[in-house]
Amino acid sequence: MFGYLPLGAAFGILAMDVGIPWWAALTMSLVIYAGAGQFLAVALLANQAGLMEVAVATLMLNSRHLFYGLSLLGVFSGAGWRKPYLIFALTDETYSLLTSHRGPVKKDHTMAIKLSALNQLWWVLGTLAGVMIGSQLAFDTTGIEFVLTALFIVLTIEQARRLRRWMPFIVAMATALAALALLPDRHMLLGAIAAASMILLIQYRLDMRAPQQADAS
């Protein structure tokens, strides 16, 4: 709630600032529900980008959800009719909560869908508050989109404190810096995610082989 209400409000304010109707901003939060993707869409629409540009940019930005989905195959297994909404409502923040939850998430799909729906409710209410504020008050919105970056930083810190394993975060930082230095902007996100995933998969295979080799010896 404390993350989504101000973040949704920031989106609503930005949407009104660039001339998007209030009902369109609210509809985006209801049927698209992609925080970073919605911020990107606002920026692109403000610069009169075409539909194809918006589609490709959004696809590249949200490609990280491919990796999220793979890591939640066990969590969503057996969810039945609830599975489509769990997939639709999977955001960075929901993923963080699902993977850091200490209860029986894999067996409790009711909890997972309540958590997902509640997060979307906060986002929609935040958007509604933002469009109301944006329609009534005029102020400089420069830098307001940083709330998204700030929330990602908080989520990363929470995951690091819970896992107490620094290798994934070191790999993520190294691959991100390498992608920033070596790849063009349009390929940077996907390249960093792919490289980090490959390194962590290799590390996982090595960790799995170590006990087997010890048993064989």
Image (cartoon, rainbow, N blue to C red):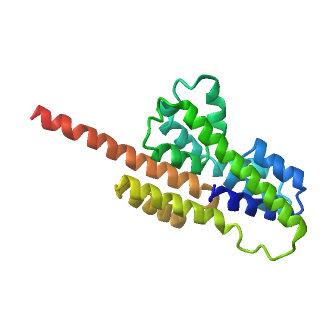
Report how many numbered discs are placed on residues in the image: 0
Picture coordinates of residue 77 (x, y %)?
51, 27
Residue 26, horizontal then vertical, whole percent: 82, 50
Who's the residue at 63% across and 54% down the image? 1
Q: Residue 54, position in %: x, y? A: 77, 51
The residue at the point 16 percent across, 36 percent down is 213
Choose top left, top right, bottom left or bottom right for residue 90: top right
Answer left or right for 2 relative to 132: left
Whether 184 is drawn above or below 70: the answer is: below
Please, is residue 152 above or below residue 101 in the view? Answer: below
Q: Residue at left 45%, top 52%?
A: 196
- The answer, for residue 49, to whether it is visible in the render is yes
Closest to the observer, 32 or 81? 81
Image quadrant holding the C terminus, namely top left
Residue in front for this viewpoint, 38 or 25:
25
| Quarter holding residue 132 | bottom right
- Identify the residue at horizontal 60%, vertical 55% (top origin): 187
Q: Is residue 214 left or right of residue 90?
A: left
The residue at the far left in this view is 217
Q: Is residue 75 above or below residue 120?
A: above
Q: Is residue 118 left or right of residue 194?
A: right
Coordinates of residue 58 in the picture (x, y in percent)? 70, 50
Q: Residue 24 versus residue 61: which sits nearer the camera?
A: 24
Q: Is residue 184 left or right of residue 133?
A: left
Can the viewer see residue 57?
Answer: no
